[in-house]
Amino acid sequence: MTDLSNNIEDEISTITLDDEFDRKKKYLNPCGFDDATLRRRDVEMKELQKAYPDVAPAHLELAWNFCEFTPKEEQDRIIASKEFEKKANKRNMGGIMKNAMSIESRISTN
């Protein structure tokens, strides 16, 4: 019975937190960037956050990833065609609410 308890103590003492939690060693990289690209992204994200303090960091990261994965020719085509600058759909403005349901709504005539 002492042999069994000694083996359990040896096994428990050899496990470290780094062995248990692999996430401590590396941060998540869902896009599969290499180390150099990750370092460049960190530097450029800090610059973007200084330039655009009112934009959420997640949106800046989304834009950075788009520019990283999209070829320069495709980016130029999107800018020239103003593909992302289309007018948004009209939204309901005002109306009467009852029990969290719109009973009567007015559509903006702009």
Image (spheres, helix red, strand yellow):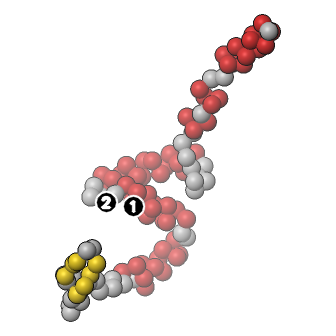
Determine the residue located farthest toward the top in the rendered image. 2
Specify few, some or many for label 1: CA neighbours under 10 Å numbering under 14, 14-19, or 20 or more: few
**Quadrant the N terminus occupies:** top right
Secondary structure of the residue carrying tag 1 is helix
1 and 2 marks in contact (CB < 8 Å): yes
Q: Is residue 81 left or right of residue 90?
A: right
Q: Nearer the viewer, residue 17 or 88?
A: 17
According to the image, label 2 marks what residue?
Answer: 55
Determine the residue located farthest toward the front in the rendered image. 99
Figure check: 6 above or below 56:
above
**What residue do we see at 42% from left, 52% from top?**
44
The reply to whether residue 23 is visible in this rendering is: yes
Q: Nearer the viewer, residue 79 or 108?
A: 108
**What residue do we see at 26% from left, 81% from top?**
102
According to the image, label 1 marks what residue?
Answer: 59
Q: Is residue 30 left or right of residue 97?
A: right
Secondary structure of the residue carrying tag 2 is loop
